[in-house]
Amino acid sequence: MKLTIKDRNYQLEFINETLKELDLTYIHPLLASTTKYAISTGGKRLRPLISILCTEMIGGDYLETRNMFLALELIHNATLVHDDIIDEDLYRRGEPSLFSEHGIKKAVLTGDALLSMGLMHASKTGKPEVVGWLAETSLKMVQGITVQNQYKRRL
């Protein structure tokens, strides 16, 4: 079965609505507002879309990918928040970066909250190996950024 652009648009709408309706009631209000800011500034939503496409390739229903794509997107957004701090980027996706708008301390804590939320959603997939893979991948990314930052200073 070949999916149409209309199907993809519906899936992107599903992704964006899921992110918009993300339950933040369990997060302290001081972090909830910055967390919402970090995930609402747009983006291409490639990670959730790839998650949906892979599920469909093996005959699954994209509606069942919710926790997996939330894990990917939340962790991705955490890395963007931290990356903006490290690179001192004042803008992200045409909007003020979180740290330039709310300060470094709040941005670091928001990035940490997003990472934690991502791991919580990964654990809800019922596949422990997903949590391990995300943790391992995140650590590799942090190490890569550390090396990149070290070499950037030498140039």
Image: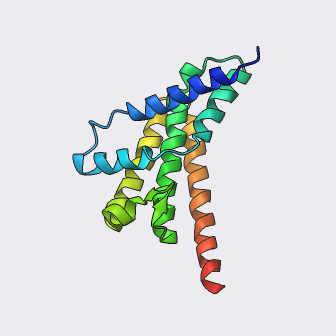
Q: In the shown orientation, is residue 125 left or right of residue 27?
A: right
Compared to residue 118, the image places residue 152 above or below, namely below
**Colouring chosen for the image of the structure:** rainbow
Q: In which quarter of the view is residue 11 placed?
A: top right
User: Can you say whether 153 is above or below 5 in the image?
Assistant: below
Q: Residue at x 63, y 28 (%)?
A: 52
Residue shown at the point (50%, 47%) measured from the top left: 75
Q: Nearer the viewer, residue 13 or 88?
A: 13
Would residue 139 be seen by someone viewing this image from the given angle?
yes
Image quadrant where one finds the N terminus: top right
What x and y, as percent, mark residue 117?
A: 41, 42
Residue at point 36% right, 67% down? Answer: 104
> Is 86 in front, or is 128?
86
**As drawn, 38 above or below 1:** below
> Which residue sits at x=59%, y=21%?
62
Query: x and y percent of residue 43 in the render?
Result: 54, 45
* Residue nearest the viewer, comparing 51 with 42: 42
Query: Which residue of the protein is positioned furthest toward the left in this rendering?
Result: 29
